[in-house]
Image: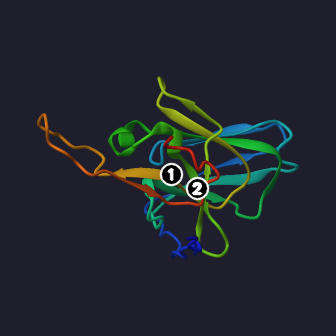
Amino acid sequence: ESSEVVALVRPQGVSTGAAVTRRIGPAGGVLASSECGLRINIPAGALKAETTIGIEPITRTNIAGAGKSFRLTPHDVQFEKPVSLTYAFSVETDSIAMMETFGFSYQMASGAWKFVGASSYDIQGKTVTFKTTHFSDWSMMNRVSLSPLHASLEPGNKQVVKALIYTQSKYEDLFV
């Protein structure tokens, strides 16, 4: 029994605040938005020319989203080296089922959201980092979520917990 996975096309997010911008050139640099909880670290050599980099908070249209969504600009920039996106997740700690399934996703040109995960986690510092070579609209999400996420049970009681998987998975044995 195989069911075809159909990508869910979603509208683009709408701006919810002013963008934070900074001119960054071949020497590299850092741009941070406290409103979005995001820091972009652009290494030296990633940009060929001075470019205005921006982080803008947007409404979350990713149905599996957890945490903030943001528009990273310019969309057409191609980095020569991967750029680090670091997200502070302290606010969402209660909505993260399993750290290993929490990470970044971006909205493709088709309108569907693509989960890309994380390059690294800092559990103590409550940050998650992903390295990318392109900008678009991004959202934090749980690739796998549990429903209910929290439950209090008396001894002897039972609770059905469903695992909701939002993307095709190459980790078929995630729950083994």
- Place of residue 43 in the rendered image (x, y in percent of width and height, measured from the top left): 78, 36
Q: Secondary structure at mark 1?
A: strand
Nearer to me, 29 or 90: 90
Q: Which residue is mark 2?
A: 105
Q: Secondary structure at mark 2?
A: strand
Nearer to me, 41 or 105: 105
Residue drawn 78% across and 59% down?
77
Crowd tier of the residue under label 1, counting other residues whose Cα lies within 10 Å: few below 14, some 14–19, many 20 or above? many
Res 67 visible: no
Contact (Cβ within 8 Å) of mark 1 with mark 2: yes
Residue drawn 45% across and 60% down?
64
- Place of residue 105 in the rendered image (x, y in percent of width and height, measured from the top left): 58, 55
Outermost residue, top side = 124
Q: Is residue 85 above or below residue 68?
A: above
Mark seen at residue 149: none
Residue drawn 59% across and 60% down?
168
Residue type at mark 2: give it: Ser
What is the CA distance from the residue labelled 1 to the residue labelled 2? 6 Å
Label 1 vs 2, first from the N-terminus: 2
Q: Is residue 100 above or below residue 12?
A: above
Q: Which residue is mark 1?
A: 140
